Image (cartoon, rainbow, N blue to C red):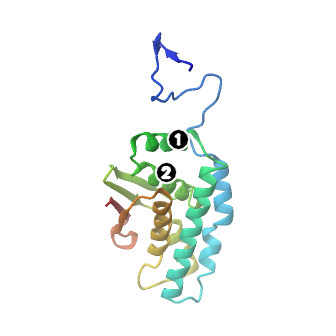
Amino acid sequence: MTIKYRYGKPIPERLLTLEEPGKPLLFDADRGLIVDVSAVCNVKAFVQGLKGKNEKEAEDAFAAFGRKVMEMTIGLADDRYLDRTGEMIEKVAQQTGISFPHRFERYVELSLIGYRPLDRWNIAKATTKELRLQLFACAVQKELKEAGIEFQGMPCKALCMASFGAAAGKTGDDLRMELEKTLPQDNVCEFAFFCT
């Protein structure tokens, strides 16, 4: 057994060191993830494919696209583009048994960065019981407007909910998900996630 020391004191084995001398550690998302996800999950091309669809057909297409985005993001984030943040989140979750919100939030943020890199969004609240995500600008809404596609309701909600559902499925978090505010009415889409 090798005992590691820091500042002349032994480091207990159960604690993690956040630095590895001589090895660069990236804590930020790799730009390659954005390139790879946005190349396959192109919002403009997806929206063009919605022309002529009724609301139910559009909702189904949105849901399928949302799942595709998240599944691709998870695959890339956990393999080719695994960064130090991802490693640490997983290690801490294993050591503490606390998954929510950090594991779920990581996938949600990376998916948004991946296929909608210019959107404006914010995490308004993050606790072990509740997470709140606010979207102030939405590439999907913008592309729908530019393409002249209008729906009575908000079938695009299915995209986000399916994407978030896929992330919760990956992390094993049992969540209640709600859309409490919408861009058309409140100038923000606010999603609330409650750990049940």
Relative vertical location of residue 10 with respect to residue 158 in this rendering, above or below: above
Mark before the other along the chain sequence, 1 or 2: 1
- Residue situated in front as seen by the camera: 165 or 154: 165
Rendering coords of residue 118 (x, y %): 55, 57
* The quarter of the displayed image where residue 154 is located: bottom left
Rendering coords of residue 89 (x, y %): 48, 43
Q: CA distance from mark 1 to mark 2?
A: 9 Å
Rendering coords of residue 65 (x, y %): 57, 72
How many numbered discs sit on the rendered protein?
2
Q: Which residue is mark 2?
A: 106
Badge 1 vs badge 2, beta-carbon distance below 8 Å? yes
Q: State the mark number for residue 118.
A: none
- Residue situated in front as seen by the camera: 165 or 95: 95
Q: Secondary structure at mark 2?
A: helix
Residue at 41%, 58% (x, y): give it.
Answer: 173
| Disc 2 residue type (three-letter) | Arg
- Residue situated in front as seen by the camera: 91 or 157: 91
Relative vertical location of residue 135 with respect to residue 12 in this rendering, above or below: below
Give left or right: position of 94 versus 114. left
Q: Quadrant of the N terminus?
A: top right
Q: State the mark number for residue 85.
A: 1
Relative vertical location of residue 157 with respect to residue 37 in this rendering, above or below: below
Residue at 49%, 61% (x, y): give it.
Answer: 167
Q: Secondary structure at mark 1?
A: helix
| Disc 1 residue type (three-letter) | Thr
Residue at 39%, 47% (x, y): give it.
Answer: 98
